[in-house]
Amino acid sequence: RLLRCSLSYFPVLLKIDSKKILLVGGGNIALFKFKKILEYSPQKFTVISKAFVEEFKTNNPPFVELIQKPFAMDDLDGFDIVIVGVEDLQLQQEIYDECQIRKVPCNCVDELSRCDFIFPATIKNGDIVIAISSSGRVPGFSVALKDYISTFLPTNMEEKMKEIMILRKSLPSGKERMMRIKDEAKKYF
């Protein structure tokens, strides 16, 4: 018999280079999510807010568009993912409800009941990404655990992964290849 927990987030790494992402909010809470998403280069990243903290306005890549105006529901048109980083709980609820109708995944920062997905603490080294989560219950714990795990990781992980990728290409696909790659990778840790 399977046990059900009250929060159940399936861990998945989502390819976003073909996704259009909307972030509502221009304060420090939204800025934190903004920086996390920038690391993964979505196709289009639009941020709508009545006002922006100064850091939003510096060195943005071409796929970022900042729109300074009050949010309107038709701003959701055409987006694949929505993140809401505003302190207005009524606006959060309205955006979340509309996203549910449109079947667009939505994350309302610090409001688990309004999150179709959450942001894990991550360690990123080139193509290697390690995600750590407390299912959104205690994000600070996840960050502390990420920092702890980071101290044990080899500094040359990306280089070693590239070596193993060459080996992988030389082997026929199947279970034997997977086992050989796993055994080879263990030598580095």
Image (cartoon, rainbow, N blue to C red):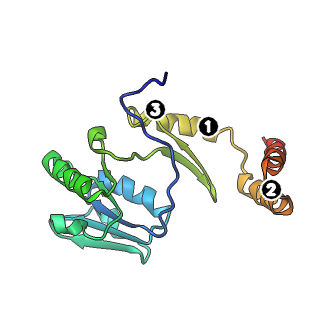
The mark lying in front, picked from 3 and 2, is 2
Label 2: few (<14), some or many (≥20) within 10 Å?
some
Extreme residue toward the bottom, this view:
62
**Which one is in front, 117 or 59?**
117
Q: Is residue 170 left or right of residue 88?
A: right
For marks 3 and 2, the one nearer the N-term is 3
- Which numbered dot is residue 149? 1
Could you say where residue 53 lies in the image, as x and y percent from the top left?
27, 61
Give the amino acid at mark 1: Ile
- Which numbered dot is residue 164? 2
Q: Is residue 9 left or right of residue 106?
A: right
Can residue 59 be seen here? The reply is no
Q: Is 91 situated above or below 57?
A: above
Could you say where residue 184 lies in the image, as x and y percent from the top left?
84, 47
For marks 2 and 1, the one nearer the N-term is 1
Q: Which residue is the site of mark 3?
A: 141
Give the amino acid at mark 3: Phe
Looking at the rendered image, the quarter that the C terminus falls into is top right
